[in-house]
């Protein structure tokens, strides 16, 4: 059967294309798919040991079965939905500015007295091995359809851990972002400040960095580098 595979970040650059066409024999699994990819696209082989795979927007594993027509994506470790959610939410992958005041107002209901937020922005200097010492700007890329579903998942995890949290917002900007521009915004609301909102907001940004498929490229004066994480999802991350 013929499968179409979406590529993101370093994998897209190594392959010099954003989709692959692979033929595999049925029945097929993620393992047999990756073997076929390695044989057909040698340039991808160095990345495959740490590559993450999604099938129909859920993390997949070596034994996961693949069928014709499945939506398959390959991407490096990460650096919406029809269900009714119990409280006000705001999830977005956007190329535009983040209107934090508007989002804050959307979370502030009559029973809310505390909103705690985290805001990430572009640094001009990065003291990390392998990255440019000075950053000119960042480029963010996302598997947007899956990313918004994972934001919904994070919200549900927060409500399970901190049931008194009410509204939740998770926003990630993509595209080219200049020094000082806001990249990420996570906010949690509750009736009072002692009802888990500080821990919930911290959990939200940490979890976003683990399971939401977003990647950034650091652009320096002399080189540019994709920043990849080390977290490897398992079945509990679906």
Image (cartoon, rainbow, N blue to C red):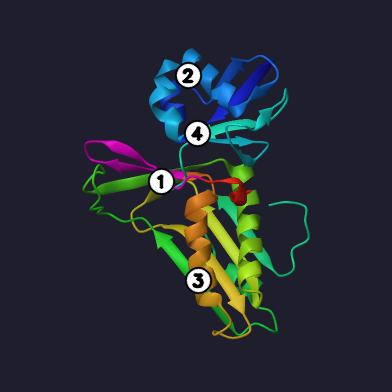
Residue at the extreme front: 63
Q: Nearer the viewer, residue 205 or 122?
A: 205
Query: CB under 8 Å between callouts 3 and 2?
Result: no
Reading the chain from its start, which is encountered first: label 1 or label 3?
A: 3
Residue 156 screen position, x and y as percent: 66, 62
Residue on which disc 2 sits: 38
Residue on which disc 1 sits: 230
Residue on which disc 4 sits: 8
Dot 1 surroundings within 10 Å: few (below 14), some, or many (20 or more)? few
Secondary structure under tag 2 reads helix
Query: CB under 8 Å between callouts 1 and 3?
Result: no
Secondary structure under tag 3 reads strand
Q: Residue at x 65, y 20 (%)?
A: 3
Dot 4 surroundings within 10 Å: few (below 14), some, or many (20 or more)? many
Real-space Cα separation, disc 2 to disc 1, in angstroms: 21 Å
Secondary structure under tag 4 reads loop
Q: Residue at x 55, y 50 (%)?
A: 94
The answer to whether residue 129 shows anywhere in this view is yes
Reading the chain from its start, which is encountered first: label 3 or label 2?
A: 2
Which mark's residue is nearer the viewer, 4 or 2? 2
């Amino acid at each position: 059967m013929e499968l179409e595979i979406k590529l993101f970040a370093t994998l897209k650059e190594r392959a010099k294309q954003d989709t692959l066409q692979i033929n595999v024999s049925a029945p097929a699994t993620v393992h047999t798919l990756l073997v076929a990819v390695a044989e057909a696209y040698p340039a991808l082989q160095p990345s495959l040991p740490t590559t993450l795979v999604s099938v129909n927007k859920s993390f997949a594993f070596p034994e996961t079965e693949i069928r014709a027509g499945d939506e398959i994506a390959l991407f490096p470790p990460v650096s919406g939905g029809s269900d009714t959610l119990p409280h006000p939410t705001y999830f977005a992958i956007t190329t535009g500015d983040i209107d934090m005041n508007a989002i804050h107002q959307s979370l502030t209901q009559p029973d809310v007295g505390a909103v705690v937020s985290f805001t990430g922005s572009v640094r001009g200097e990065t003291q990390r091995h392998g990255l440019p010492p000075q950053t000119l700007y960042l480029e963010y890329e996302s598997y947007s359809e899956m990313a918004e579903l994972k934001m919904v998942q994070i919200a549900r995890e927060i409500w399970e851990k901190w049931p008194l949290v009410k509204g939740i917002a998770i926003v990630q900007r993509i595209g080219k972002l200049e020094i000082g521009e806001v990249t990420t915004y996570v906010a949690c609301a509750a009736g009072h400040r002692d009802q888990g909102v500080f821990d919930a907001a911290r959990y939200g940004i940490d979890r976003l960095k683990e399971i939401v498929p977003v990647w950034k490229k650091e652009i320096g004066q002399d080189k540019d580098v994709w920043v990849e994480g080390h977290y490897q999802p398992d079945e509990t991350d679906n």
